[in-house]
Amino acid sequence: MSVNSADIEQIVRQVIGQMQGTASAPKKSAGAYPKTGRVAMLTELEKFELKEYAIPALGDDDILVKVEGCGVCGTDAHEFKRDPFGMIPVVLGHEGTGEIVAMGKNVKKDSAGKPLAIGDKVVTCMIFKDNPDITMFDLNKQNVGGADVYGLLPDDDVHHNGWFADYIVVRGGSTIFNVSDLSLDLRILIEPAAVLIHAVERAKTTGILRFNSRVVVQGCGPIGLLCIAVLRTMGIENIVAVDGEDKRLGFAKEMGADKSVNFKNHKGIEELTKAVEDAFGGYPADFGFQCTGSPIAHANIYKFIRNGGGLCELGFFINGGDATINPHFDICAKEITTVGSWVYTLRDYATTFDFLKRAKGIGLPVEKLITHRFPLEQINEALKTNLAMEGLKIAVINE
Ligand SMILES: [Zn+2]
């Protein structure tokens, strides 16, 4: 049996990995990894193919992560269905997490300054690490610049660029966090939860959202449900959830909503508004979070909010069309303060780790948001389940 230089390199890496692994914590795995790993490559519309590629030699600043799981995002579903970003062939998946199995010699700490070692559980973040307040809006203007948006990088000669895979190569300079103290399910929820941490930060800038506010949350998909959980961890208890499905409204109560209103049970906006006010004991809401992508829902929510109240619109991640409102009645005469919210800043991302711990601490079953789990081999089904709007959060889990 001949031993070539690549094999020697592999052995050396394994030995070093084992030494680092045992030195930092005995429970951690040895840091061994195979020569190749599979990725789910989107090769044409609605078709992922599992492809196997060599795991490249790591640079001094690079990190190799064994993927444990990755959430399916609306962005993945759009790309799968229509390729709006023109990235095919691409390895998708940006809501991923896994365990470090190898690191370049320069890697010592994560983007928050926490030590990194083989065996640590990590997530990446699409926001630049050197500017904690940069938002997705700025990121787009800079055309992604030097940020590594894993899961949204067109295929290149590294190939291991997305989280729908066995392994991902996290290049030096990327934003990465050590989240070893969170369970796999909670780690998968970090990215979507960060969207709500950001939205609530935006809402706070109005000065209207307080611990004792009456808050209406419209839309009980994963975003609306996480919104309710974030509000609860802030001590806000007077929350009314609005949706068209009783099952989702049941979830809303588990996430901390006090009351719920199924809009399908009420004819017309006057009746619906009355139902929301009744749920607050006869009062309109002080503040609203609009978490659906429906223009009609956007128009409706103004009616639920009191004069001088506030609104955070975060439902339109993508263009969902025009909404018809009456600027006099809905905004001017009521003096409503509105804020928009889109994606998150790096600061929000780091805050999210603590939100998830607090949510667990006060007994909110946030992991239940992950309703469907698929192995990597069934990634096409995972994406189709997301597109069919079945369940809440869909995740790809590696054994
Ligand atoms: Zn996402």
Image (cartoon, rainbow, N blue to C red):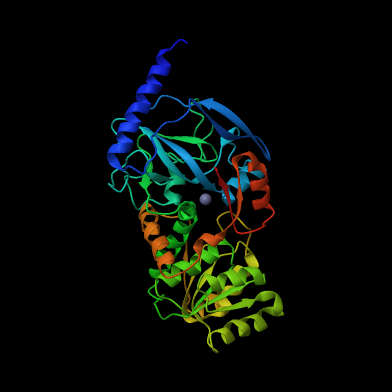
Question: Quadrant location of residue 274?
Answer: bottom right
**Quarter occupied by residue 254:** bottom right
Q: Can you give x and y, in whole percent of width and height, for residue 369 in the image?
A: 55, 60
Quarter containing the C terminus: top right
Nearest the viewer among 238 and 376 is 376
> Residue drawn at (33%, 51%), measured in percent from left and top?
132
Query: In this image, 160 relative to 22: left or right?
Result: right
Looking at the image, is 387 positioned above or below residue 323?
above
Residue 387: x %, y % from top left: 67, 51
Q: Position of residue 195 (x, y in %)?
A: 47, 58
- Across the whole image, how many numbered discs are drawn on residues? 0
Q: Position of residue 133 (x, y in %)?
A: 35, 53
Name, please, the residue furthest toward the bottom: 282
Q: Nearer the viewer, residue 225 or 286?
A: 225
Residue 93 visible in the picture: yes
Q: Is residue 119 left or right of residue 330?
A: left
Q: Residue furthest top?
A: 2
The answer to which quarter of the image holds residue 297 is bottom right
Name the one closer to the observer, 121 or 225.
Answer: 121
**Picture residue at 45% right of the left edge, 69% below the top:** 363
Query: Residue placed at 46% from the left, 56% from the top?
Result: 186
Question: Residue placed at 42% from the left, 48% from the top?
Answer: 138
Residue 326 visible in this rendered orientation of the protein: no
